[in-house]
């Protein structure tokens, strides 16, 4: 991919992977949703599921922040090339028309990006990988299994049951060791006969 689409794809990959956002949350985002003073992203358009609420503000971590100024500079330049005043375009990731891309258009961008890179799969891998890496790093800092799942579920704004069902496959080292130890150690009950 070359030009504007390549720049958008680069930002989308870095930002979705670095924040764990869903594609629709980024596609429908406004420029104002990205706060580069506090380094948070305000989720105004959450997934439409029961219990989901807008207004969450996941942090934009240090390793993702470096991609933001580069993208914003390219975004401004591209909007000027298209004849738009960048100050008047409120969309964070604008289409060639200066508006939100359609769901199909945003999906096609990601599909094309994967195809050109020779990657099999889809963009959901960014969110899943973000959560698994977060869980692994929490485990490395000696958080308990339940805390790991709770923290990651809150970061990605879904239930703990969803985290367990879709993401937390007991990859944490402590979880694996505990399962192996419990399975391989015989349970011996000693009966006290009051002797």
Image (tube, rainbow, N blue to C red):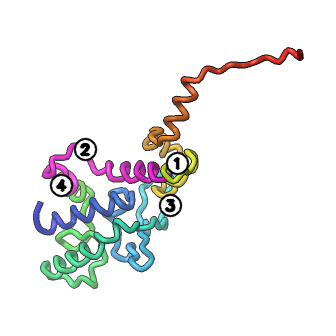
Q: What label does residue 121 carry, if any?
A: 2
Q: Label 2 to label 1, Cα distance in Å?
A: 25 Å
Q: Quadrant of residue 45?
A: bottom left
- For the record, the magenta segment spans 109-138
Q: In the orientation shown, which residue stands out farthest toward the front?
A: 195
The location of residue 134, given as percent across then percent down, is 44, 53
Q: Label 4: how many residues lie within 10 Å, few (<14), some (14-19) or many (20+)?
A: many
Residue assigned mark 3: 53
SS for tag 2?
loop
Q: Are marks 3 and 4 in contact (CB under 8 Å)?
A: no
Q: Are marks 2 and 3 in contact (CB under 8 Å)?
A: no
Q: In the orientation shown, which residue stands out farthest toward the right?
A: 194
Q: Label 1: how many residues lie within 10 Å, few (<14), some (14-19) or many (20+)?
A: many
Residue assigned mark 4: 113
Q: Label 4 to label 1, Cα distance in Å?
A: 31 Å
Residue displayed at 12% across by 80% down: 81
SS for tag 1?
helix
SS for tag 3?
loop
């Amino acid at each position: 991919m070359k030009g504007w689409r390549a720049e958008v794809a680069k930002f989308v990959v870095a930002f979705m992977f670095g924040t764990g956002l869903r594609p629709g949350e980024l596609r429908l985002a406004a420029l104002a949703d990205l706060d580069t003073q506090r380094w948070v992203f305000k989720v105004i358009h959450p997934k439409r599921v029961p219990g989901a609420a807008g207004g969450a503000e996941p942090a934009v971590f240090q390793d993702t922040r470096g991609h933001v100024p580069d993208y914003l500079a390219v975004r401004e330049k591209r909007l000027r090339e298209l004849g738009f005043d960048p100050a008047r375009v409120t969309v964070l990731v604008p289409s060639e028309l200066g508006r939100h891309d359609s769901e199909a258009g945003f999906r096609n961008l990601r599909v094309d990006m994967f195809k050109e890179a020779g990657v099999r799969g889809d963009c959901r891998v960014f969110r899943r990988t973000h959560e698994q890496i977060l869980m692994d790093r929490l485990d490395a800092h000696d958080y308990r299994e339940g805390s790991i799942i709770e923290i990651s579920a809150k970061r990605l704004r879904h239930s703990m049951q969803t985290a367990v069902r879709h993401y937390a496959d007991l990859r944490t080292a402590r979880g694996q060791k505990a399962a192996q130890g419990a399975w391989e150690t015989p349970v011996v009950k000693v009966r006290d006969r009051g002797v």
